[in-house]
Amino acid sequence: MLLAIDNGNTNVKFALVDANGSIVQRWRIATDVKRTADEYAVWLVQLLSMEGFSREDVNAVVIASVVPRALHNLQELATKYFRVEALIGGRAPVEWGIALKVDEPRALGADRAVNAIAAQALEAGDKIVISFGTATTFDHIGADGAYLGGSIATGVSLSLDALYNAAAMLPRIAIEPPPSDSVIGRDTVSQMQIGIYWGYVSMIEGMIARLKKEIGRPVKVIATGGLAPLFQMHTDLFDRVEPELTLRGIALLYSNRTTA
C-alpha cells in the first residue's frame, strides 16, 4: 500500500491508500520541524498496528510538503522504517502533470498543486478550490486541469489567535457558528463568534463572487480542509466539500507517476 504524507504548516497528515486509490486509514500529528524520523516511527507504527496493519504493508511513500525543514526527517522515516525511498511531489517520477500557468511555478505550494490534480479528477469544467488551512487559499483550476492562479488570505484559526493575543480583554474562544443568524451580539463571546464566523463567511462569499465574475464561465466550487464542513453547515457556499482532497491528490500523483 501507499503511504501518502501531506506535510502542512499546522499538521502532518498520513493516509494509507490501497491499490484502488482508496484511503483506508488516516492520521495526523502537529507539524514540528524538530520531530525526528524515530519519533514519527514510534507514533505511526503503533497506529498502524492498532488498525491491523504493519510496516511491511507499506511499499511506497509519497510526500507533498510545504515545510522544507521537516522534509528530511520524513524522508528518513521512509528509508529507515519502511525500506523505501520517498517520492517527493513535483519531482520525477511524480511530477505534477498539470500546467502551472503562473509567473513563479516553483513557488506554488505542493498542497495547492495536488488539490488541483484531485479537483480535476472530481469535476469537469472550471473549478474554484478553497482550502481552509493555516492560510485560506482560493485557486482557479481550468477545464483542462491547468492551475491558473489564485489568492491567499489569513486562515480562520490564525485570525482568531491574532485577536486573542493582541487584545488583553478578549478571551480565547472556539471556532464555531453563532447560535443564531443575528450579527448583533449581546456579550463579548457572541460578538467574537459573530465577527469571526459571519465575517469569514462574508469574505468567502465576496471572493467567490469576484472569482466567478472574473472567470466568466460556469464554475464549480470545491472546499477542503478541516473547517470546510463547519462553513457548509450554515451556508450554501460550496458545490462539494472534500476534506481529504490533498491526500487524494497525492494518491493520484503516485498512480499517474512516470516509469521511464
Image (spheres, rainbow, N blue to C red):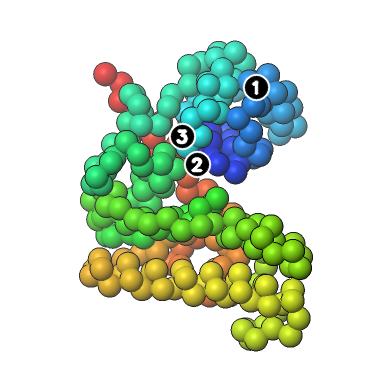
Which numbered circle lies on residue 36? 1
**Residue at image point 69% right, 83% down:** 185
- The residue that label 3 is drawn on is 64
Q: Element type at marker 3?
A: strand
* Residue 172 image point, x, y percent: 74, 62
Q: Tell me which numbered mark, 3 or 1, is placed earlier along the sequence.
A: 1
Task: Give the quadrant of the C terminus.
Answer: top left
Name the one closer to the observer, 226 or 34.
Answer: 34
Q: Element type at marker 1?
A: loop
* Residue 109 image point, x, y percent: 41, 41
Q: Tell me which numbered mark, 2 or 3, is placed earlier along the sequence.
A: 3
- In the displayed structure, 171 sits above or below 236; it is above
Name the one closer to the observer, 68 or 4.
Answer: 68
Tell me the crowding category of disc 3: few under 14, some 14 to 19, or many 20 or more residues within 10 angstroms, Cα based: many
* Residue 148 image point, x, y percent: 27, 52
Q: Amino acid at mark 1?
A: Thr
* Residue 151 image point, x, y percent: 38, 57
**Residue at image point 75% right, 32% down:** 50
Q: Tell me which numbered mark, 2 or 1, is placed earlier along the sequence.
A: 1
Name the one closer to the observer, 143 or 169.
Answer: 169
- The residue that label 2 is drawn on is 247
Which numbered circle lies on residue 151? none
Q: Tell us which disc is closer to us: 2 or 1.
A: 1
**Residue at image point 72% right, 28% down:** 43
**Residue at image point 62% right, 16% down:** 81
Tell me the crowding category of disc 2: few under 14, some 14 to 19, or many 20 or more residues within 10 angstroms, Cα based: many
Q: Amino acid at mark 3?
A: Ala
Tell me the crowding category of disc 1: few under 14, some 14 to 19, or many 20 or more residues within 10 angstroms, Cα based: some
Label pair 2/1, CB-CB below 8 angstroms: no
Q: Tell us which disc is closer to us: 2 or 3.
A: 3
Q: Amino acid at mark 2?
A: Leu
- In the displayed structure, 7 sits above or below 235; it is above
